[in-house]
Structures are given as structure tokens and as C-alpha cells.
Amino acid sequence: MKIAVDAGHGLNTPGKRCSKQFDTNETREWTLNNRIATKVCEILNNAGIETIRLDDTTGKTDVDLNTRVKKANNENVDYVLSIHHNAGGGTGIETYVCNLGCLNGETGKIARIINDKAVEKTGMRNRGVKIGDLAIIRDTKMKACLIECGFMDNENDTPLIVTEEYAKKIADGITEGLFEYYSINKPIEPTPEIPENNKINVVYQTYTNGRWQPNVTNLEDYAGVYGLAVTGVYANLSNGNITYKVHTKGGKWLPEVIDRTDFAGILGKEIDGLMMKSNVGTVKYRVHILNKNWLPWVTGYDEKDNNNGYAGILSQTIDAIQIEIV
């Protein structure tokens, strides 16, 4: 399958932001849409479903609707999901299909499952599935829906929709809806529990945008900046040693580095591959492709194995990484 995911609008589209009354940061709608879209793509990718984004994943450009529609149609995707947030003083989640025929057919069935799963996961008010003459769902030639994930000017919704927790819940709901309709098994990643007193922490950081970014421990966050190339990597374990090396875009695999005796990479040269191993536990790691999505987790250490031997797709720039010892 191939699913097109669309984060509505652009970062600086006029008027598309949270009300300052309920969010002092006046978070932009695209920021909220993108966070959910990224999580949706990640979950779908982990289930073996190919995804494409119809918007500008940096948010800098509000890609016009005609361009988005053409991309979906040209890519011949199976489904189009457009993610938005609402305004107008209401509360809750609602989902749109383009006409009455769609509402009463399979398109409406998918939309209802997605909508209801999103409501179930978040506990928000269910505003139901509605008809909307909206280009992104009207002019695409495949089944499509547009989901409004909450209101940016409501005292109940706004404090919730700006949180990471809410984005995760609604992304889980949306993808569960797709899995249910298309009879796809939701991916389950085993995460062996390690007693806290035996927990091995990995601390890592990336060199991005001319400086070393803050350290990250385990999966508390990711290292890197979405939209900006990684050109260096540092890592170490709280107990044990970690060995790693990187592949430079258009270049080759560079020598191994152990802990922070050096960094992996050539500052200023983009990285498109990462390999890691340790003398304790198993390193589980993954990378995010610039302007695309997170790739699946890997645990191997073999530059000839492009399935589980390294993280990345050679020729495609990495902009973020995550690492854990299991």
C-alpha cells in the first residue's frame, strides 16, 4: 500500500495558529499538523506501508492545493489523509469526505472508523463525519478524508492539542482506524524490560547547523533538527562501550569510533548511513530521513546488509537519530 499524508497549510500561513488566550506561544497550525503527520507516517512505515507527504515537510512553503492533489494522483496512492486543526469556537474532532456518495460509501466507512478511533484514543468530543467541498479530498482520485484534530481557539481543546501526548494519542487512533479497515496487523515492537539498577544508558548528540546539538539520553527525545542535515555523531554508554561509524553522502563508510574518543563524521559533509554496536546489551537504533520519515529500527552492524546492518538509505540525508540499549 501507499498512503499520502498531508499536514495542512504552511508554518507561516496567516491566521493559522492557536489563540494566544489559551496558548501563549501561539503555536502554528502546521506545527500541530506536522507533528501528527510525522507520527502517522512512522507508525504506517513500521507496518510496512509506504507513505508520502503532500506538504512541505519543513513548513516553509504553504504548498498550493492543486500541487498537493497532482502529487497524490501522480503517485497513484491508495488513500489520502489530510490533517488539520479547527477554529471557530467549537470543541472536538470531526472528519470530512467530499460528497454524499462518499459519505454513504466505503470512503465514509473509512472516515468513520478513523474519526471514532481518534475520539476513543483522545477522549475528545465526537463531532462526527461530515461533507466538505474541499479540494484535497474532492479532486484526488482515490479515497480520502480530512480530519480536524481539535480547536485552536477553545479553552478545553487548545491546552491539549499542543502537547506531545495528545499528538501521539491521535496518531495512534488514526492509524488504528486504517489498520482496522484494511485488515492490517498493527506492528508491535518488543521492548525487553531491563531492571532499573541494570539499565544501561546511551547518551548521544549530533552536529547540525554548524554546532553540536544538546545531548539526548535513550529515547527521551531524538538527536538532531528536522530539516537540517546531520554531519557528525557522538555517543557513549553509562556502563560499557559503544562502537559506531557513519557513511558520508556520495562518499564512503568512515573509520569506527569508540565512545567519545572521537566523533563519527566529517563536519560539513552530510551523513546517509549509521552503524552501531556495543559490548553490552544490543544497540537498537534508527534514523530520520531529511524531509521524509523515520526508518525502521535496526540492531545489526554490517555495511553490506541494507536491511538490518545499518540505519539509513545511502544517498538520502539523515537529519535525526534515536538510540537505545536493550
Image (cartoon, rainbow, N blue to C red):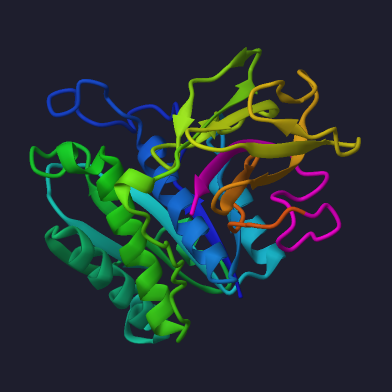
Q: How would you classify the magenta stretch by its main secondary structure?
A: loop
**Above or below 78: residue 192:** above
When asked about the image quadrant of residue 154, the answer is top left
Of residues 155 and 106, which is closer to you in this image?
155
Quadrant (top left/top right/bottom left/bottom right) for the N terminus = bottom right
Of residues 122 and 267, which is closer to you in this image?
267
When asked about the image quadrant of residue 265, the answer is top right
Q: Magenta stretch containing residue 306, yes or no? A: yes
Residue at screen point 50% across, 53% down: 6
**Above or below 24: residue 145:** below
Q: Which residues are magenta?
A: 302-326
| Residue reaching furthest to the left | 155
Position of residue 293 in the picture relative to residue 250 (left or right): left
Q: How many marks?
A: 0
Of residues 199 and 32, which is closer to you in this image?
199
| Residue reaching furthest to the right | 251
x, y (%) of residue 39?
A: 44, 53
x, y (%) of residue 185?
A: 46, 81
Position of residue 314 in the picture relative to residue 87 (left or right): right
Residue at screen point 46% across, 62% down: 81
**Above or below 252: residue 233:** above
Residue at screen point 64% across, 29% down: 259
